[in-house]
Image: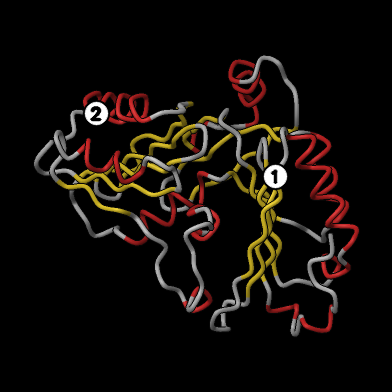
Amino acid sequence: MVIFNNDKKINNPERLTLTIYAGTENFSFSLYDPKETGSYFYKELTGENQTDAFAAFKDVFFDNAFFSLPFGKVWIMYRTPIFTFIPNAIYEEKSKEDFLQFQFPENQGKTLNNVISYTGISVIYKMPEDVHRFMLLSFAKPDFIHYSAPFISYFLEKVKNVNNRRMVVNLQKKGLDIFCFSGETFLLGNYFKCSNLKEAIYYILYTWKQLQFSQLDDFLHITGNSVFREELNNKLLLYIKNIYSLSIFPEIYFEGINTDHIPFELAAL
């Protein structure tokens, strides 16, 4: 699959940011110039599983010479539901192996550590060895990042002067992410596998209750592309007063572009 028939269309590659977003059933990539209006380009490749999606991405990679251009920055974002957060102060070399063995007993894949801005914590996760190795060999000094990191950092930066407690729900095709904040403090981040409206309502309200959020004073923000997003909003209004849709902020490179299909965490990065 040839994405760009003429690589000369890409001017000033040193100003561009390339992001590869890898997941269990899809790979996507985005390309943009942070100084150029409407420059954002997004392409998603899907498969029945990780192997199919990765194979589709490699086909596109080898069919398009522009991947070898000297980009200003290359990000490799990975989505996995198995991850954990740990304070940076206690994630030390002498205890690292014991912690990783406890958290990831199967010891499969490459263990990566991603510091999250504004929080003092890191997210620890596993990435398939073949995917990690391919990215290292294909790009010059790529930065690896877990999908939760830009989401958390972005939200803290945009509303860092808000004192209320907030829950952010990111709806996915087969589950949902929940991130919770109190003022400038990150409280919780988790992924819940679910496939229908009732399960989504249960996980949201259960987490809301466990953290003792207020039905009248605290805030719920919902983003994502689930088919039942609007119905979810209406159902939750019976229990929570302050519910708002979370949209991608109109940065210059998104001007004139429909951002509905772009994952929020990818845009946040």
Q: How crowded is mark 2: few (under 14 residues within 10 Å), some or many (20 or more)?
A: few
Q: Residues within 10 Å of mark 1 (few under 14, many from 20)?
A: some
Give above or below for 55 relative to 211: below
Residue drawn at (34%, 62%) of the image: 158
Quadrant for residue 104, please give it.
top right
Residue drawn at (82%, 61%) of the image: 140
Location of residue 100 in the rendering, given as x and y in whole percent from the top left corner: 63, 23
In which quadrant is the N terminus drawn? bottom right
Mark 2 lies on residue: 211
Q: What residue type is labelled 1?
A: Thr
* Distance Cα–Cα, label 1 vs label 2: 36 Å
Q: Which mark is residue 36?
A: none
Mark 1 lies on residue: 46
Location of residue 78 in the rendering, given as x and y in whole percent from the top left corner: 64, 43
Which of the marked residues, 1 or 2, is nearer the chain's N terminus?
1
Q: Are marks 1 and 2 in contact (CB under 8 Å)?
A: no
Q: What residue type is labelled 2?
A: Leu
Give above or below for 238 relative to 170: above
Question: Left or right: 27 with respect to 247?
Answer: right
Q: Regarding mark 1 in the picture, which secondary structure is present there?
A: strand
Quadrant for residue 111, please give it.
top right
Q: Which of 83 and 48 is in front in this view?
A: 48
In which quadrant is the C terminus drawn? bottom right
Give above or below for 181 relative to 250: above
Give above or below for 23 relative to 4: above
Residue drawn at (31%, 44%) of the image: 185
Q: Nearer the viewer, residue 186 or 3?
A: 3
Question: Left or right: 22 with respect to 175?
Answer: right
Q: Nearer the viewer, residue 252 or 56?
A: 56
Q: Regarding mark 2 in the picture, which secondary structure is present there?
A: loop
Location of residue 155 in the rendering, given as x and y in whole percent from the top left corner: 37, 54
Residue drawn at (29%, 48%) of the image: 221
